[in-house]
Image: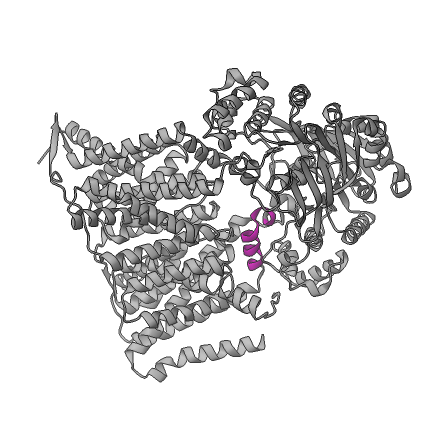
Amino acid sequence: MLDTAAIEVENVSITFDGVRALDRCTLRVEKGESLGIIGPNGSGKTTLLNVINGYYRPEDGRVMIFGRRIDGLPPHRISRMGVGRVFQVTNVFKNMTVLENIMAQGVWMKERKNLRSRALEIMDLVGLPRNLKDELAGNVSGGQQKLVDIARALLPQPEILMLDEPVAGIHPIIKEKIIEVVDRLRRDGKTLMVVSHDIPSILRMVDRLAFMNAGSILMVGDPDEVRRSSKVVEAYLGV
Amino acid sequence: MKAGAILAAVAVAILLSIPIIAAGNNFVITLGFIFSVYIILALAWNIVGGYTGMLNLGHAAFFGVGAYTLALSTGAGIHPYIGVMAGGLAAVGLGLLMSPLLRLRGDYFAIGTLSLAEAIKVAVLNIHAYGIRVTSYEGLGRVENYYFVSAVLVAVGATTYLLQRSRLKLALVSIRENEVLANASGINPLKYRVIALLLSGVFTGIAGGIYGYNLLYIPAEHVFSIEWTIIPLFMVLIGGRGTLTGPLIGSFIYLGIYYVLQFTLTEISLLAFGLVVVLIIKFMPQGVIETLFIRTLRIKRVSII
Amino acid sequence: MIFPLEVLFGQLLVGAILLGGLYSLVTIGLALIFGVMRILNIAHGEFIIFGAYTAYWITSLMGVDPLLAIVLAIPVSAFLGYIVNRLLIRGVTKSFDAPIVSSFGLLLIMQASMLIAWTGDPRSIVTPFTAESIHVGPVLLPIIRLIAFAVSITILTLLYIFLSKTYLGRAIRAISQDSESAATLGIPVQKIQTFTFVLSTVLAGISGGLVALLLSFQPTFGPEFLLKSFVVLALAGVGNIPGVIAGGLILGIGESYGSFFLGSGLRNVVAYAMLIILLLARPRGLFGGRAVREV
Amino acid sequence: MSLQVRNLTVEYHRDIEILRNVSLNVEKGLVTALIGPNGAGKSTLMKTLSGLLKPKHGDIYLDGVRLNDLPPDERVKHGLAVVLQRRSVFPQLTVRENLQLGGWRIRRDQRLFEDTFSEVINLFPDLKPRLDDKASSLSGGQQRMLEIARSLMTRPKVLLLDEPSAGLSPLMVKLVYRHIKELKDLSITIFLVDQNIQQCFSVADYLYVLELGEVKGGGSKMELSASLSDLIRGWLYLEQGGKVGGG
């Protein structure tokens, strides 16, 4: 069907400790599109990703992936539907080797044999040197851990990949690498959602830009148009 | 890998030749039997306590239930070795009963399993205050039991070896390291923890059964004693959790301490265990393997599978 | 002998309440350490038994009154608590289960040391009024239980006043609620945690002294008291003294009636069953802590 | 000069740097603010100043005393107080108890303690009728007020405010800033970080700009306000956006 989007978020609301983290938030991400999300701290960007991942169950509204309703499903079920996630905080299994970290993502997959070779291929894809494969993930550099994170998310070949601040605080060389990887995924037709404060970087990774404030998406459109909008500038000013 | 295979073959050969070398020396065979039981328990405890990182303080319950089932089976006229296997099955049943506790956070799981084991012990003591007799079977004696326990030891060793190379290990260790992240990787934590607990239970139950048959009399106080939790925990902790070699090395260190303390009081060995546990946690929280072999001697780590 | 049902239940209930008061005191030390340091001290029961032995030896060697002996035992418990905190608690790696394993090792050390020092023979403190009771209507009140109950409730009340009315007590509560924020106000968090650890071992020691008046005890009885404390905490929630008193009473009542109906051999099974049910009912933690999902 | 920060570098994970060679001064009796886009490292700087994070290198001086190696509670003794970005009242204690705990350092000096308490409470009259209520019963804005008041109880030489407007309604933000202005009028030295740039400008004497972990400049309110719009557009990367983006 042509008219099903990859991700549809409809009027989703969620409240923590009386604060409305998402407020009738609505968003549509088309198949094969790369969408960036910007917005001030606390505007609900990470919460939105967490709702799509199934970590939070929305109080109100619906979330659909490829036309199938998923709000209320546990995170691992959503993950198996082809939704990958790279977290804001670099998150590796510190006492497992780099290769094991990546392979852990494929534990549930039907395919039995090729897990190891596929994990190695993905190390190549994201630019992790193969001689790191037997190092404990806790012992490699922070930027490399981020690459492990991304590699892990890519192992099951997800149709949708959500990246939360993929380049924040990363060493410039590895940052370049990450941007290249994401850009290549975009060109390969994956559906991407990228949250970032780093505007120059995000522009190189997305087709459209959404601006979020106070728990809702205020504007979606061409990146230049969104950045030029006075609404956006005002929100950053704190009016 | 080659060296490991040779080492394993040598170990199995020694294990199987002990009765022949000892030739009727009951003391040696009994000692070999008991140590094998301890090592089985350590490897079994390690599946839960090491790979999943859930501190099971109720391990003794598996052991006691296995021994008791054996006694009840022989009482009903069942072949003892079938009774031993039934003990393993009963432990699996207990594992299923325990599995809701696996949803708990680590320290609550420790408390829950400790209480469950104590509750079962008290309940059993209430019925059989002095224990229960085992009906012996013609032709199955010390030596046969020794071979039986050796087979179980090889089985649990092989299981750990295969586990080490399996996806199950990846799942268990990733859950231990970061449950939320593992969940996001498509892993259902409860499911894998239950599998680990049942695996751990079945070997411990069988070990309890064969231990009970070897004793021919089962004092409830003894087979449900917390020492069946403490000694395996100690062996695993000292060697290093979540490995195959860790518990094995740990058990040799345990044997050492056992010999040193053999003619002294058991209290002193408890004291020594306690001290070693505390010192290990303070100075080598990763266990001897990680600290000595990998960090100090820089032996290379290899991703298996 | 056949008693009228009312008398039996009256007697049973009174006995349960007297026991419950002591259970509350047995628990409070564990609650304090968990609240302020976030450590589940598996060796809590050993501190109780240690207190029992200290009181026992003071009274039998020095011939002083048992209640005075409990008071004299306080510095001994405090010293032990300080040493343990210094050597074992501070500086242990913050790995996923290091503190609990470490305190498990402490349990073994203390249990074994007490077995070596004092053998496994059951001991108890005999007082002039051990066998005495007073009659209140149809109900028989053993004096020694009344004393233990009164001492427990008094200490818990004093502790409650200390925590709510004094400056130091408030700082302790502040640390248990938000230790980082307390540090940013200049409150010396580590010093106060040390103080709290010592305080909790002293409370455990006192409760041990009272236990020694009521029951015969052995070095291996520690885990039993630990588990009872867990049951009370599970019922009460941490940092809540009235709750701990209520939890102790519920445990006392549950045990007394349980052992009456099921036989005294199953007395402890009732406590364990209560704990397991409570654990399963609140899988994310006994102490009312909200599950925070850190991603 | 009151607070001096020299070449402060902070990293979380090995080579991931959050702050790089940050140097700045907080002058006595003035309000100094730090502005910057999200993720620039503002809160990291605050946590490092208050002692909750350890810097990799660099120095922090308060009136000539080096604070780097001191734990948070020791820094308070030297006159540095912080109001954390997150909610940090003790929820189960009363407002009065919260304030009293702020005065831990001066608790033995009964008169000083009483005087400070009444000074502080006069600055925040909204708290007066709520003194015996639990802090958890206060509204978000009142809790923020309590946090500031509680920090003042430590009699700080420098007060650090980390995102005082975070999570508050616009009305509450105005109220909180009205109080900050009052503190400024009393010549209390304040170092402020906030994403609410307008409010920062309304209260600050001097501002620093932090971008991607580095101080990109600074100036008085006058100097910066002319270029403010450009500054924000720069954060949104308008100039070069056309060239790189849109692909």
Magenta highlight range: B168-182
Residue at 24 percent of width and 43 percent of height:
C72
Is B232 rendered above or below residue C264?
Answer: below
Residue at 27 percent of width and 48 percent of height:
C49
Picture coordinates of residue B214 (x, y %)?
29, 69
**Residue nearest the viewer, comparing C153 with B109:** C153
Is B57 rendered above or below residue D64?
Answer: below
Q: Where is the N terminus of chain A found, in terms of image quarters?
A: top right
State how the image is colored.
one colour
Quick check: D34 left or right of C51?
right
Quick check: A227 left or right of B224?
right
Residue at 56 percent of width and 78 percent of height:
B3
> Residue most toward the right?
D243
Q: Quadrant of residue C239?
A: top left
Look at the image and tell me whether residue C274 can be seen.
Answer: no
Picture coordinates of residue B289 (x, y %)?
51, 66
Picture coordinates of residue A139 (x, y %)?
63, 58
Is C262 rendered above or below residue D200?
Answer: below
Look at the image and tell me whether residue A65 can be seen.
Answer: yes
Picture coordinates of residue C123 (x, y %)?
19, 50
Residue B222 in the magenta stretch? The answer is no
Dominant SS of magenta comes to helix
**Residue nearest the viewer, comparing B182 with A172:** A172
**Residue nearest the viewer, comparing D43 with D235:** D43
Quick check: A220 left or right of D96?
right
Is A63 rendered above or below residue C73?
Answer: above
